[in-house]
Image: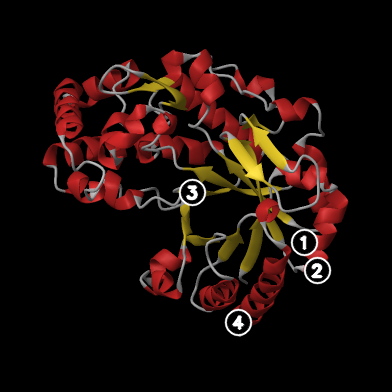
Amino acid sequence: MFESMIEVFPWDLHDGDVERVLDHLQGELGIESLVIPVMVSPISQLRTQKISPHMFRTRGGAFFHPDEDRYQATRCKVAMSSWLKQKSPIENTLRACCERDIGVRAGVSLMHHPRIARRHPEFAVRNALGDCSTTLLCPFNADVESFGAAVMADVSAREGVSGIHLVDPDTCTHRVDGWEKSPWQSLGPFTQFCLSLCFCESCYQRAHGTGYDLGKAREMVCGLIDTAIQSSEHATVDWQAQVADHDGLMAMLQWRSVGLVSVLSGLLEASEVSVWLDRGGLDAECVSGISAWPDECSVVANIGSIEDLDALDAGQRGKLCMRVGPEVAGTDLVSLLKQASSSGVPSAVIGNYGVMPRSREDFVRQAVRFSRRASSV
């Protein structure tokens, strides 16, 4: 049976009154499952609901109280959201969902944590120029890797959590990083991508163990950055094509992909529930050369049209949780979910409730009803 979900952030549930919001989503829209992000990167959200504050901001972090015993093996500790000090923890929401038989998948972002990166630069991504990221953690750092496994075990053990949407641990796909407010933004996406590649001590240790010459790769990336800085066309080039056409970059990314599969396998093993890899809307497959994620890991991906859906083969559709964002028109939302439910896609998540106009809810209601009907035929 096709599963229709909607993404709801913890603050939108709490500030709008958990009981009332759940009644509305289940009773009026027909939603049977939720995706609730419980560990997030910094967010600013202008909410459409008539609740206070109208503009919600968070520096990110965990929206649950961690089980400290699970983090004994790592120096990297959970940064709890300051919102959690004032509001009820996520357990209240999970309990309310269980009482209504509403499924919950928890959203988890493990590598985008400015508060941890600033507090512990030894855990952070360090680019080819030696600059330490103030936003991203390196997935190859042993403490970060243990931290990720502890979070997966901690979240998945919560009563009411039926799955986890894991934001892609491949930090090089977050090519803008924290530099979107710096002069580096003007250098264009290819240079930003090169600047997002990590050359920290942990990466050097991993490279040494595998025989890969990361020092030579760093010289190559520095050269690419210098060349791009001197170019007047860096903002207009097809950066993905540049990456794909560069043998040295692709060799480095292939080396990274092998390590990332190992990291991801450890995260999957730590989780007690099913995991969906959320690739963040970026076409990271062609960029990072990763084609061999573990078979047991399904994928969350943005699908904006029936043409996008038809481009997938049956095997890909069978492992897909389709994300439909606000950029998809209401009528297209209805036809897209109906088509997905009848073509082997197991689930779809509509995002997100906190910024959803009332006028869109009619289309959500239709989409849920028609997709349920189509999947039962």
Q: Eyeballing the image, is 283 above or below 63? A: below
Q: Amino acid at mark 4?
A: Ala
Residue at mark 1: 25
Q: Secondary structure at mark 2?
A: helix
* Along the viewing direction, whichever of 360 and 6 lies nearer the viewer: 360
Q: In what quadrant of the picture does the N terminus appear?
A: bottom right
Q: Secondary structure under badge 4?
A: helix
Cα–Cα gap, marks 4 and 3 = 26 Å
Point out the residue furthest to the bottom here: 377
Q: Quadrant of the C terminus?
A: bottom right
Q: Position of residue 16 (x, y in %)?
A: 82, 48
Secondary structure of the residue carrying tag 3 is strand
How many other residues sit within 10 Å of disc 1, few (<14), some (14-19) or many (≥20)?
A: many
Mark 3–mark 2 distance (CA, rounded to whole Å): 28 Å
> What residue is disc 4 on?
374
| Mark earlier in primary sequence (4, 3) | 3
Q: What type is the residue that disc 3 sits on?
A: Asp
**337 horizontally vs 359: left or right:** left
Q: Which residue is mark 2?
A: 28
- In this view, 137 is above or below 297: above
- Dot placed on the residue nearer the N-terminal end, 3 or 1: 1
Residue 207, image x and y in percent? 24, 24
> Which-is-in-front pick, marks 4 and 2?
2
Which x, y percent locates residue 57? 66, 35
Contact, mark 1 vs mark 2 (Cβ under 8 Å): yes
Q: Residue at x 46, y 54 (%)?
A: 299
Label 2 amino acid?
Glu
Answer whether residue 272 is visible to the viewer in this image.
no
User: Which residue was labeled with disc 3?
Assistant: 278
